[in-house]
Amino acid sequence: MENQVGPIEVNRSIDAYLRVLTRIENGSEKLPEVFQRLGRTGRLIIFTRDENAQSEFLGMMVGYVSWPREVQLIKVSTPTVEKELAGVDPASIAGLVFCSVNPPAQLVGQRHRLGSSIVLVPVPEAAP
């Protein structure tokens, strides 16, 4: 008897990884919808834990499904990112994504949990 993988579906492997790592079903569809609601301008900054393969892999998958939005991956060696956020210009970004990284306490009210390991903090567009 042959081993069978099953039907070939677009983003099947991404959905499987996201389901295991974050418990998000159909993540390849749900995450891009969330990122599209952030607005048209600005990049996403994705924070991952340095030397944590699962966090880094998750950050890369988030970057992949957020296409065509520009992304910047920042690896942090501490559990929080206060130092790294100090140099970020809010006018140039649409949102902050934390993959297995704790967002700073001052962002508590703005957080949106996307599964068990991803937190999104939208950055509102500046008024003209």
Image (spheres, rainbow, N blue to C red):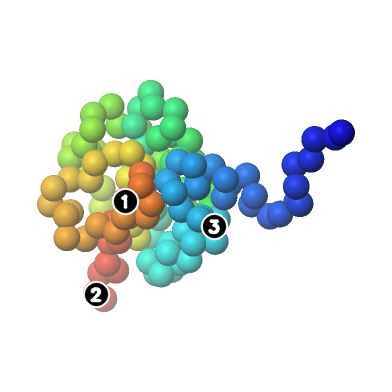
Q: Position of residue 75 (x, y in %)?
A: 35, 33
Closer to the camera in the image, 74 or 111? 111
Q: Which mark is residue 119?
A: 1
Which residue occupies the extreme top position in the image?
51
Q: Residues within 10 Å of mark 3 (few under 14, many from 20)?
A: some
Camera-nearest label, 1 or 2:
1
State how far apart marks 3 and 1 are (Cα).
17 Å
- Identify which residue is drawn at 38% across, 60% down: 42
> Quick check: 67 above or below 100?
below
Q: Residues within 10 Å of mark 1 (few under 14, many from 20)?
A: many
Q: Position of residue 19 (x, y in %)?
A: 50, 47
The secondary element bearing badge 3 is classed as: loop
Which residue occupies the extreme right position in the image?
1
Q: Position of residue 39 (x, y in %)?
A: 39, 69
Camera-nearest label, 3 or 2:
3
Q: Amino acid at mark 3?
A: Asn
Look at mark 3 in the image and give the residue it sits on: 26
State how far apart marks 3 and 2 are (Cα).
34 Å
Q: Amino acid at mark 2?
A: Ala
Q: Is residue 93 visible?
A: no
The secondary element bearing badge 2 is classed as: loop
Which residue occupies the extreme bottom position in the image?
128
Asked whether, in this view, residue 100 is left or right of residue 63, the answer is left
Asked whether, in this view, residue 13 is left or right of residue 40, the answer is right
Look at mark 2 in the image and give the residue it sits on: 127
